[in-house]
């Protein structure tokens, strides 16, 4: 199996996991991309229903959004630059995921950032919460510039909200991009419930640092078995 074949299989498996996870909208809308390691090319799903992704339904693109191999449906071609801009702006990004996860997307539709009111946001790299990139038609130059503005402005970030549209997450690999989407959606759901109880309370800035330090301390200690 070639590296590309292996990555395509990872995408198909991740799409199935996402559909099974219950964090997608009822239409299963979304798209997944993975950078081909050591290159300026990426694989991207070519249909918008993550329940219908097959090995043949994945195209290969360069960072200027040119199709190098495979095929892409016109409806998916619109969003190629939305993935490309993350790889261009974040050279360490190995995967990008876009969904309309409903609780997080509700924040995007209300044009409200997800506040750091739930500890996992800090633990999973959203130290300033989840910001909103201003609206532009999906994949348009305006939208892409708005995404870049957010990426350039925040160092510690694993994803963002697309105003009036949905969710965009990324990571070193596909597993991290999926994890970021799960954390965003779980946080958005819980914070929305908390808002019904009088309002979510943010984790103070110095405590966010403490969370990070504690994680680093325990990671450095490693696994210790008694006796
Ligand atoms: Zn979308």
Image (tube, helix red, strand yellow):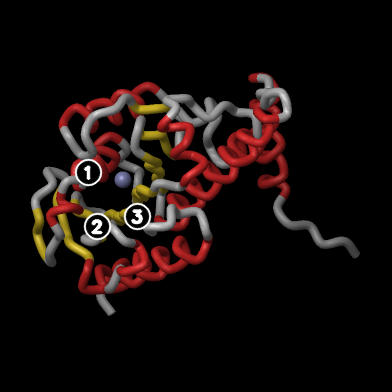
The answer for how far apart the CA atoms under marks 1 and 3 are is 19 Å
Which one is nearer the viewer's eye here, 195 or 178?
195
Pinpoint residue 226: horizontal percent, then vertical percent.
87, 61
Name the quadrant of the C terminus: bottom right
Residue 29's disc number: 3
Q: Residue at x 35, y 48 (%)?
A: 98
Callout 2 crowding tier (Cα within 10 Å): few <14, some 14–19, many ≥20: many
Residue placed farthest to the right in the image? 227
Q: Are marks 1 and 2 in contact (CB under 8 Å)?
A: no
Pinpoint residue 118: horizontal percent, then vertical percent.
65, 34
Q: Secondary structure at mark 3?
A: loop
Q: Secondary structure at mark 2?
A: strand
Residue 139 as seen in the image, left or right of residue 162: left
Locate ligand 1 by image quadrant. Answer: top left
Q: Are marks 1 and 3 in contact (CB under 8 Å)?
A: no
Residue 44's disc number: 2
Identify the image quadrant of residue 45: bottom left
Q: Circle 1 sits on which residue?
A: 84
């Amino acid at each position: 199996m070639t590296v590309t074949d292996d990555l395509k299989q990872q995408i198909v498996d991740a799409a199935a996991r996402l559909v099974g996870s219950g964090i997608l909208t009822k239409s299963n809308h979304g798209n997944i991309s993975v950078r081909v390691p050591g290159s300026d090319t990426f694989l991207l799903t070519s249909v918008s229903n993550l329940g219908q992704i097959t090995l043949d339904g994945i195209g290969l693109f360069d960072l200027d959004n040119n199709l190098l191999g495979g095929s892409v449906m016109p409806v998916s071609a619109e969003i190629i630059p939305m993935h490309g801009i993350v790889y261009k702006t974040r050279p360490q990004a190995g995967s990008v995921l876009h969904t309309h996860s409903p609780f997080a997307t509700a924040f995007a539709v209300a044009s409200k950032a997800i506040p750091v009111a739930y500890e996992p946001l800090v633990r999973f790299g959203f130290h300033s919460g989840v910001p909103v990139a201003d609206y532009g038609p999906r994949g348009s130059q305006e939208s892409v510039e708005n995404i870049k503005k957010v990426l350039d402005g925040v160092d510690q970030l694993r994803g963002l909200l697309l105003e009036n549209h949905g969710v965009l997450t990324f990571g070193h690999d596909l597993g991290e991009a999926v994890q970021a989407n799960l954390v965003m959606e779980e946080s958005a759901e819980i914070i929305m419930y908390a808002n019904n109880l009088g309002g979510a309370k943010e984790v103070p800035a110095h405590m966010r640092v403490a969370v990070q330090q504690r994680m680093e301390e325990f990671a450095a200690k490693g696994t210790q078995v008694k006796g």
